[in-house]
Image (cartoon, grey):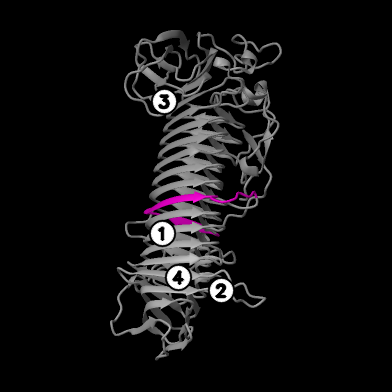
Amino acid sequence: MKKIICISLITALLLSACSQNTTAAGDNSQSQETAVSTSQEPAAGDTFGSYEEEDTDTSYDDSSATIELSEEMTSSEGVTVDGQTVTITEAGTYVLSGELADGQVIVNIDKEEKVHLVLKDVTITNSQGPAILIEQAEKVITTLADGTSNTLTDGTDYQLADDETEPDATFFSKEDLVINGEGELIVNGNYNNGIRSKDDLILISGSYTVNAKNNALKGKDSVQISDGIYTLTTEEGDGIQANNSDDEAKGFIAIDGGNFTITSGRDGIQAETAARLQAADITIQTGTNTISSEESYKGIKAGTELLIQSGSYDIHTADDSLHSDGDITIENGDLLLASEDDGIHADNNLTINGGNLTVTDSYEGLEAGVITINDGDIQITASDDGLNASGDSGTTEESETSASASFGGPGGAEQPDESKMILINGGTLAVDAQGDGLDSNGNIQMSGGTVTVDGPTDNGNGALDYDGTFELSGGILITAGSNGMAMNVSESSSQASFGIYFTEAQEAGTIISLQDSSGNVIATYQPSKAFQHLVISSPELKVGETYTLIQGTEADNSEKNGYYENGSIVNGIELGALTLSDTITNIADTGEEVTQRGMMGGAPGMMPNDGAMPNNGEMPDGGEIPNNGEMPDEDETPNGGFPQ
């Protein structure tokens, strides 16, 4: 369905800005260009995050200062004890063990110095504030000792001054915070956040279980994760969040590995600027509590750029599964997405270069200003459009195209937006859409790959819908759908194409095959829904030749997405001989050439006198078309529309 965007485009921050260093003072082991640049695929060993050697070092000297947490603690060198409050005042390594039933560990040292905390079976509960509070240091590195389990819990009654909102996390740091080791950390964030750094939050390894009222993991300048196992559950907030909106080179999330199970009240992963992920196994469920149209429930959300380099992703969301206010690039990986809104939404560019992508449920499958598919195995199921090259927001108005725009090419009520484009250069794309299959407010170009579309059964939508041109120069294209708004590709295409109108609607599961005069199969396809129009294009089609159209219910060889690459119909019925008289030939199943207007319910070459849809808007088996085949008055987005 055509869309006119009503919300202004959020300005995309260019990658050139990312050449600035985003590490804290003293952390210059790796430039930001190396850490997060997406201009090319990272070489083996490259990471999106910036990890210093000391960040990954889990060793410590057995003679390090040991703090046994208990009610009997006393002060020592570098450590001040006041009741059950332990304050570390000097740089060094401190090994903590034991329990504080209602206490706190504080780090407050010189701004230019560092502390290494080692947690060995530590349990800290603080009913009135953070369990661990980093007040001042250059950096604090926390090691989860191998084979140990550590638990941090806060209460709901933080004691803050009237004008203060922080600290606000069970493990709260005003400085860079690094956590490594092979032990376990359990964090119960009853007041607000679970683990939070107001600079960089860097997680190297370990096993984490974080239950938080608001965000589970939060870093202001960045969240960078090398590896580890994460079970993150939030009531009202995000699973992982980086929120610096003042510096375009900060506010990013970099994930280079790990296993994540995120169940979040809001977004699963949310970066103010860029989110870049690789080699991770991520499961996300959002919107687990009450849904509000004022909140965001996206799976992975980025302000400027979202890059998925590799990994496995299973994402079920109440809002877009993947979302960027700028660009999205998928290089590789296995993605399984189910969304109550868009499967993938990018305000600007969506580029898919490889991987396996399945959208099992969505309102619109893929939506962006420009959608480019270079490779990959992609399957899209959508209750509205499968692919939609439109604008930058889910807030839209319905654009009702006139008959002259809908039947076969450019022209009509809406002028094409030349900035909107669907580009298909390779890969395999299968679309099952109740609205338009491939929909562009501008143009479509296809030069390779295999594209199959099971389009709409109502006559208010089409398997293909474009305002400008659809130039086809290569690949296999097969689309099936209703014939009320049916379109073929444009006459400017260099590869031949049949647009076949059926005198009667065909039942779901009917197999259609096109063979040349020697009996060679050009294409065999089995639509999953009722249809009355097919577009078939193949490099094997030759202008001037005659082909046989065959109908049946069984074909030999295996199929993928309804397409039998080398299959032919078994015991089929010949419907007619179709002559490809021109590069773009629109023809009835009986063999008569028709204009694109010609099969809208009447005989070939004729419009019905009253302009009505065929069969009074009915499909086979009595399935009535909504509004008797009329276009809807407006485009209703699900759940009242979500914030972008």
Q: Residue flagged by tag 4: what amino acid is it? A: Leu
Q: Is residue 414 above or below residue 572?
A: below
Name the residue that disc number 3 marks: 562
Q: Nearer the viewer, mark 3 or mark 4?
A: 4
Q: Gap between marks 1 and 4, in whole Å?
A: 15 Å
Q: Which residues are magenta?
A: 272-293
Q: Is residue 95 above or below residue 418?
A: below
Q: Alpha-carbon neighbours of circle 1 within 10 Å: few (<14), some, or many (≥20)? A: many
Q: Earlier in the sequence, mark 1 or mark 2?
A: 2
Q: Alpha-carbon neighbours of circle 4 within 10 Å: few (<14), some, or many (≥20)? A: many
Name the residue that disc number 1 marks: 230
Q: Earlier in the sequence, mark 1 or mark 4?
A: 4
> Mark 1–mark 4 contact, CB under 8 Å?
no
Q: Nearer the viewer, residue 425 or 205?
A: 205
Name the residue that disc number 2 marks: 167
Q: Gap between marks 3 and 1, in whole Å?
A: 39 Å
